[in-house]
């Protein structure tokens, strides 16, 4: 029986974060069937994942990206900010640049798609526990293409993305932005992920700072009395 370095004889302690109970149950059952793993917690959103991770201190967190409330990328960022040492293995259905890059930049150890074979998933969890980077083939190919691609002009923001950015810069929450723009909060979060990817940042504050730096936003002029 193989074990990650430094944990000889002890199972790898796991936290599963996904907003779909069926997915959590399926992963939990699959992993619990192997004596190398112990599922010690489950979370339905990013904020709950952060709270539980601080309480039970798992070795590896299997993190979905699209969840209500606090999404996966924000949760990964928050875990790092709070000094949680658990390795994060992203397990998602999305392999586009707008999801991959923010997650990796936020500190994810690995990025795997949910349709990965069981054996590949188990290998990935073991590798993540040993602090080894794990990328699904499609994600690895995207990163290689990005590294090899010639430097081009930054992709411009869409009109809707610019509107979201303006509201975020003004200090509105995702929910407030959704109400202002007559769209769902989930759609606001999707626009934010696209904005992060296009600006090469991983959080709201950095996005606003970079937008000012690029001249996309300009400081408001004081009103004349």
Image (cartoon, rainbow, N blue to C red):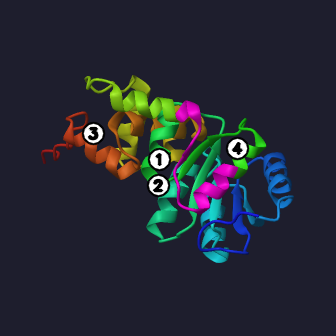
Residue carrying label 2? 107
Mark 3 or 1, which is nearer the eye?
1
Determine the secondary structure under disc 3. Answer: helix
What residue is drawn where x is 55% and y is 57%?
75
- Label 2 SS: loop
Above/below status of 122 relative to 152: below
Q: Callout 3: few (<14), some (14-19), or many (20+) C-alpha neighbours within 10 Å?
A: some
Sort mark 1 into few (<14), some (14-19) or many (20+) by Cα contacts within 10 Å: some
Region of the chain picked out in magenta, as a range: 123-139
The answer to the question of whether label 2 and label 3 lie on touching residues, with beta carbons closer than 8 A, is: no
Q: Which numbered disc covers residue 211?
A: 3
Residue 206 place in picture, x, y as percent:
33, 49
Is 158 in front, or is 182? 158
How far separated are the C-alphas under marks 3 and 1? Answer: 21 Å
* Rendered view: 34 above or below 192: below
140 vs 84: above or below: above
Q: Is residue 148 left or right of residue 55?
A: left
Which numbered disc covers residue 104?
1
Q: CA distance from mark 1 to mark 2?
A: 5 Å
Cβ–Cβ below 8 Å for labels 4 and 2? no
Distance from Cα at disc 2 to Cα at disc 3: 23 Å
Residue named by callout 4: 120
């Amino acid at each position: 029986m193989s074990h990650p370095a430094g944990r000889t004889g002890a199972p790898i302690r796991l936290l599963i974060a996904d907003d779909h109970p069926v997915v959590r149950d399926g992963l939990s059952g699959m992993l619990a069937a192997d004596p190398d793993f112990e599922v010690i917690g489950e979370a339905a959103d990013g904020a709950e994942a952060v709270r539980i991770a601080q309480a039970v201190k798992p070795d590896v967190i299997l993190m979905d990206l699209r969840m209500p409330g606090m999404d996966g990328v924000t949760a990964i960022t928050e875990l790092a900010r709070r000094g949680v040492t658990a390795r994060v293995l992203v397990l998602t259905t999305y392999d586009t640049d707008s999801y991959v890059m923010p997650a990796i930049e936020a500190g994810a150890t690995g990025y795997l798609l949910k349709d990965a074979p069981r054996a590949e998933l188990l290998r990935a969890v073991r590798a993540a526990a040993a602090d080894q980077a794990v990328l699904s083939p499609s994600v690895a190919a995207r990163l290689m293409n990005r590294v090899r691609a010639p430097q081009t002009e930054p992709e411009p923001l869409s009109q809707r993305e610019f509107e979201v950015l303006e509201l975020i810069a003004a200090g509105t929450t995702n929910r407030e932005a959704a109400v202002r723009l007559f769209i769902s909060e989930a759609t606001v979060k999707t626009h934010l992920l696209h904005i992060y990817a296009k600006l090469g940042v991983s959080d709201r504050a950095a996005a606003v700072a970079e937008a000012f730096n690029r001249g996309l936003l300009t400081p408001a002029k004081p009103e004349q009395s």
